[in-house]
Amino acid sequence: MTEQRFVREITESKRRILILSFVVAGIFFLLLLRLWHLQILSVDDYRNMSENNRLRFVPVAASRGAILDRNGTVLVSNQPSFSLAVVPQEVTNRDELLDRLAKLLGLDRAEVNERWEKGKGRARYYPIILASNISRDQVEIVEENHLRLQGVEIEMKPVREYVSGVLAAHLLGYIGEISEEELSAKGFENFNPGDYLGKNGIERSWEMELHGTDGGRQLEVDARGRVLRTISESYPTVGNSVVLTIDANLQKEAEKAFGDQAGAVVAMDVNTGEVLAFVSKPGFDPALFSGKMPADTWKEYLEDKRHPLENKALTGQYPPGSTFKIITALAGLEDGKIDEKTTVNCGGSYKLGNSIFNCWKRHGHGVTNLKKALRESCDVYFYQLGERLGVDRIAAMAKRFMLGAPMGIGLAHEKGGMIPTAEWKLKRFAQRWFHGETLSVAIGQGYVLMTPIQLASMIATVANEGTVYRPFLVKRIIDADGKPLKEFKPESMGTTGISADKFRLVKQGLFAVVNEPGGTGGAARLYDVHVAGKTGSSQVVKLRDSKQATPYQYRDHALFVAFAPYEKPEIAVAVVVEHGEHGGSAAGPIAGRILRAWFDGKKPAKKESAGLKKNGDEGDAAESPAPPVRDQSGNGDNSDD
Amino acid sequence: MIDRRLLTNIDWMLIGFVVAISLLGIMNIYSATTTYKIVGAPYYLKQFNWFLFGMVVVTVVCSVDYHFLEDFSYWLYGFLIVLLVAVLVVGRRSMGATRWLSLGFFTIQPSELMKIVIIATFAKYFAGRQTVNGLSIREVLFPLGILAVPAVLIMKQPDLGTAVLVILIALSIAICVGLKWSTVVTFAVVTIPAVWLGWTKVLRPYQKDRILDFFNPERSRLGSGYHIIQSKIAVGSGGVFGKGFVKGTQSQLRFLPEQHTDFAFSVFAEEWGFIGCLVLIILYLSLVLWGLNIARRCNDRFGSLLAVGVTAMLFWHTVINMGMVIGLFPVVGVPLPFFSYGGTSMITSMVGIGILQNISMRRFMF
């Protein structure tokens, strides 16, 4: 019985072991299935992951191109900046090291400590920056004491240097770290987080040329992040340099002439549209934007009533005031409403319906013809002319000068100003146009707005008698070795279609403004070059009476537009002094100093610029048949006065 | 002592599988440790010495008739329980756990020996009892007690891996003896609350972490979940043919944790690919099936259960280790027999092989 049971049990046990064998085989088969899944089905994913583990891509930023002025003067370049970095994993005694560093380099022990703490969460073997922008002396000290400073590294990277400090800050712009929005925006596909790029001005508009091609190193690292070898390396290509049309000396002089006042200057070559000076005041220090901006400086910028961060030359829109009388006068001449003999009797005011429109001169100008009206800026003359013309004819003339729309100077956010028409008002305010408003427009008030760029372009077009050149800021692009890559030619946006003799009539008036007794622009007169121009004061608010008490922000803007030489114009300049009150006294002298600087600067280098001019003239000849006529007219004017 | 007839019965198949696996293991350890800073003899050489020593152990173990174990198993069990208690009291601490006992001239790991002793104890216990329809609940209560004492002591060290293995080995023997369905059901009813209790009261935070990480490796990419991810990357990136000997980037750049011990298979899988793994798994499968075959051929109930126990020990080590490496099981410190670097594992496994050889050689003597 027991024997039988025993045998049964043995066979039962053996049967069970056989079953277990199959179970075991099944489990091993499952292991194989899993391996199949990992090694055959998902091999690509895991290969990728293992490559990502082992390979690090370290980008090497390309050195940014420089920005030069028209004569090759460097305005913006790069300067190596040294940072003190430490790899925490390689440091044995942290406190000792920090003490030593603080003592050797004269650093603030607490700040260094704080930076270490802040950097601790990073990937292993990633250096923490303990001090940025350290001096070359400090670099030398670190290198001398290298053996005692285990784990300490010096990192070098190029930093943008604005050679002339605040000069042309708005024009040049600044660079900064790429923002989240930019990263996800179109056109920024090649950028990575942490990259620097132009944020404003030329730095922004010409980013693609200036940036260069970033390089990088593909490194093999181990699990601790230590670099074992370089697998591949691509060298960065230095960005191209941008040569501006700006003349650095002229720019400097313009900024100096402006002093503490707020406003803008645009100076341009009347025969090409090249912008020679582009000023917005007050300025700011672009270097502060590229690096660490102290909080109080930032606050100061924001709270300054003169708005230093605003590019007034580009985005400032001002009522042109009396400078707009040039347009009204040309509209009258072109329409046959007036000629040089037409006179108006100015009694100090003009009555239209129930409203009275005052001339700036209370007692009136008496009998006034076009030349006198321009010279003395008689409002009543232009009220009457405006009334006869109607707003739409004035607007049509302004449109011939390409006003009322951005001129396409090549910087982002350029404003277009405003040239009102009856139709526009109906659309905008659902209201018909009133005659009284036409009178305001005729003297550049009311809805009319112009940017300093447009003011400069307008006077340049008058100077060259009809061609509207697109103002431009960049003359050429050159590579790092100075080889020209692209050359920018003057571009005509159109011509006004006004005959030269009509321009001559207006120009005579503008000459008188500066050079004749009673002219409002005498402050811009030069002893050796004939300047022609027009003053303007534009109302900010309508309270004309108790002037001494007018607070800064309610004072009139002072404007002055000018060109010179009268006989053979080269340069046009527009000056806007915010709340400067009188065009003649506030803006006129600035224009005068700029022109003075231009003609002084030309003297030693006369030959070269003459050569350049000649090229410019050839370009003109291709676009308009005007030059010979202009020369004649210049001579004619001369003999007239 | 060794009968000449026994020599003619040497199980060369068994020896063959073990030698093949061990040599692959040594080769793999060579690759896994090329980037290590070596003090003294290189790891692969030390492993080779352990292997040679292991073969001596096999010879010694099979020279003594395994029935010796039947006579002394309870004594050995008692002795080991004393050692396990001693470990907790005076043991040497290493890596946050107390597993080693210094006996002056050398140190031993009683929990490791317990694996063999629990096999012998269970085999002896069940060999003396006759069951036809499987074990009832009452019949498993006493063996459960025998198991519980060392299991709890080992968990206390704490050494979850070994404790789980001891339980699995004992369970395997019980299954081989046969369990009534009612036993299985009751067991389940009791175990589930016990597991919950274990989770809340017994497991150490790091053990819980490991289990949680296993279920969700992304939980802590740089914590213990990191090991599983890196190991899967190593295995998966091996592909069909592998990256080649000493060419695995995951291992050579040391992204793998403990790559010469617990994660040795990961290195192998990366460098030799699916083909290499197939070969290695077939070798292990053959070894385990051969062990079961020895158990089946043995007409002595104690011997048969002993063989099943030893085979179960090798099987569970293999499956748990490989399962861990390829992300099927949580990370528990279980070495791959004959393959992972380490003397303890090698000697324990070789003792097991000695026992199997012992049983296999004497199958005709009975």
Image (cartoon, coloured by chain):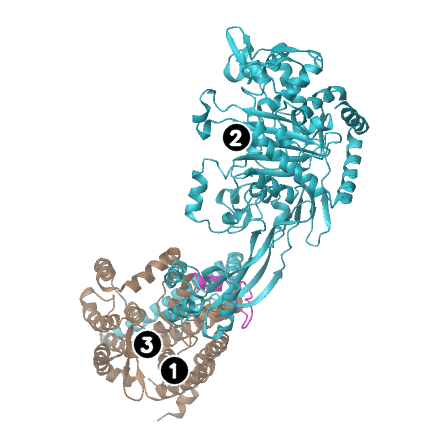
Please say if A630 is above or below A168: above
Front-lying residue, A315 or B212 = A315
Q: Name the residue that disc number 2 marks.
A: A580
Distance between the Cα atoms at labels 1 and 2?
Answer: 109 Å
Front-lying residue, A179 or A167 = A167
For residue B263, say whether it is visible: yes
Distance between the Cα atoms at labels 3 and 1?
Answer: 12 Å
Q: Secondary structure at mark 1?
A: helix
Tell me where residue A90 sits by quadrant: bottom left
Looking at the image, how many numbered discs can be counted on the residues? 3
Please say if B90 is above or below A490: below
- For image coordinates 67% across by 16% down, the residue present is A370
Instruction: Decide: few, some or many residues near mark 3? Use Cα within 10 Å; few <14, some 14-19, many ≥20.
Output: many
Mark carried by residue B304 = 3
Give the colour in which the image draws chain B.
Answer: brown
Q: Are marks 3 and 1 on the same chain?
A: yes
What chain does mark 1 sit on? B
Which residue, as the protein is rendered here, is positioned at the far top? A353
For residue A454, say whether it is visible: no
Distance between the Cα atoms at labels 3 and 2?
Answer: 111 Å
Q: Name the residue that disc number 1 marks.
A: B357
Q: Is residue B242 magenta?
A: yes
Q: Which residues are magenta?
A: B229-249
Give the colour in which the image draws chain A.
Answer: cyan
What chain does mark 3 sit on? B
> What amino acid is found at the position of numbered circle 2 in the picture?
Gly
Q: Secondary structure at mark 2?
A: loop
x and y percentages locating residue A570 in the rendered image: 72, 34
